[in-house]
């Protein structure tokens, strides 16, 4: 009743799945924090348009895409 040890390919697929799902989680948290901070700043500055929210979301997304590019190039 012993189970066979995982094959290297199966283990590699599991590690890749965990890596990429972790990246998605980080991106969602980053975007949530950027949106929250942007809304707070827009409220403090009494802006009619959500300038800080839009700006922070764009900066956060571009910065995270740069981070992903650097990480994936380092692993390759």
Image (cartoon, rainbow, N blue to C red):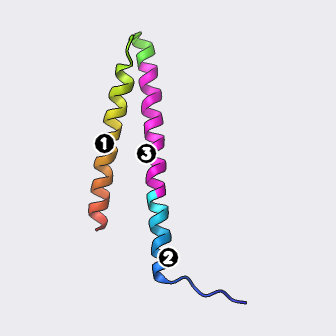
Q: What secondary structure is marked by label 3?
A: helix
Q: Which residue is drawn at 45% across and 80% down?
A: 9
Q: Which residue is drawn at 69% across and 89% down?
A: 2
Q: Does the magenta stretch include residue 75?
A: no
Residue under circle 2?
11
Q: What secondary structure is marked by label 2?
A: helix
Please identify the quadrant where the C terminus is shown. Answer: bottom left
Please identify the quadrant where the N terminus is shown. Answer: bottom right
- C-alpha gap between disc 1 and disc 2: 30 Å
Please say if 12 is above or below 26: below
- C-alpha gap between disc 1 and disc 3: 10 Å
Residues at circles 3 and 2 in contact by the CB criterion of under 8 Å: no
Please say if 71 is above or below 56: below
Q: Position of residue 57 (x, y in %)?
A: 37, 32
**Residue 24, numbered label:** none
Q: Which residue is drawn at 43% across and 45% down?
A: 27
Residue under circle 3?
27
**Residue 63, numbered label:** 1
Label 2 CA crowd tier, 10 Å (few <14, some 14–19, many 20+): few
Q: What secondary structure is marked by label 1?
A: helix
Q: Position of residue 45 (x, y in %)?
A: 39, 12
């Amino acid at each position: 009743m012993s189970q066979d040890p995982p094959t290297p390919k199966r283990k590699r697929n599991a590690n890749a799945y965990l890596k990429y799902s972790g990246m998605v989680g980080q991106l969602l948290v980053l975007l949530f924090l950027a949106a929250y901070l942007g809304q707070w700043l827009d409220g403090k500055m009494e802006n009619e348009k959500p300038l800080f929210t839009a700006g922070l979301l764009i900066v956060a997304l571009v910065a995270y895409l740069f981070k992903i590019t650097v990480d994936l190039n380092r692993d390759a």
